[in-house]
Image (cartoon, rainbow, N blue to C red):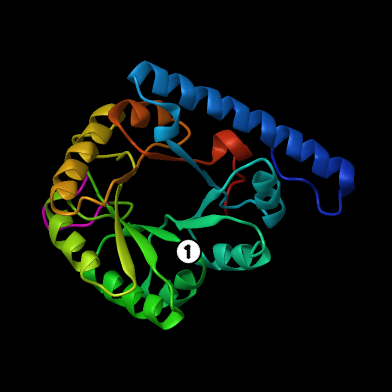
Amino acid sequence: MARGDPRPAAGGGRAVTEDRKTQLAENLARVEERISAACARAGRPRDEVTLIVVTKTYPASDVRLLAELGVRQVAENRDQEAAPKAAECADVPLTWHFVGQLQTNKVRSVAGYAGIVQSIDRTRLVTALSKEAVRAGRELGCLIQVALDAESGERGERGGVAPDGVEALAEAVAGAQGLRLDGVMTVAPLAGPYAGRELAAFERLMEISSDLRAAHPAATMVSAGMSADLEEAVAAGATHVRVGTAVLGVRPRLR
């Protein structure tokens, strides 16, 4: 488990910063041990799995410390927090992933800093992202968010398209200017047939990924697993795991 509450007090000075860096380094080492062990059990090379650190609710100072410790992929789920943080860390060599439900009125902002949007779940969002990516002169990687708790034609409780909607949405992304279809993402569902069955959920995502890759061979990214279930994600075949609490500490309760 990650140590303690996490965030340095404002103005805590060099000692506090060094303490926080040590804490983050220890937490990263524990997560690395977990990923390495999971890869070994699954018979997978360690370099097949990329760690994305979810930095939501934590300050830009933590992002900088993570970068100093070798982290290159970070994720956020709310634009109003992510945009200023990304701007403050613009000089740091990072890829920013947007992993939250994305409203179309936030697309212009997100298109300015995100390298990959992991929460593609409707064609209206594809259209808006394409327009803003072209306007910004950028190419955005896109993952189709699959909702394993959604019936046909519905969206999931935490966003995402039902499995039978993946193909059409992937075609929309693949045909959109400024966008690149990178693969699929899911969050282990809290309801439905996969609730409490994380390994089965991630194995189902791998099946969906396999079908997607038959039509789009470059869409190889599979983002699944978080602090509590990264081992199951690695066992199923995920290429990327999204870890926040185990690296940064228990998040403060949002008001």
Reply above or below: 11 against 8: below
Q: For mark 1, does the 10 Å Cα neighbourhood hold few (<14), some (14 to 19), or many (20 or more) residues?
A: many
| Left or right side of 178 for 82 | right
SS class, disc 1: loop
Q: Amino acid at mark 1?
A: Ala
> Quarter of the image containing the N terminus?
top right
Q: Residue at x 14, y 45 (%)?
A: 211
The secondary structure that dominates the magenta segment is: loop
Q: Residue at x 59, y 25 (%)?
A: 30
Is residue 152 rendered magenta in the image?
Answer: yes
Q: Quadrant of residue 193?
A: top left
| Left or right side of 244 for 207 | left
| Whether residue 229 is visible | no
Q: Nearer the viewer, residue 58 or 213?
A: 213
Q: Where are the magenta residues, as a range?
A: 149-156
> Quarter of the image containing the C terminus?
bottom right
| Left or right side of 242 for 220 | left
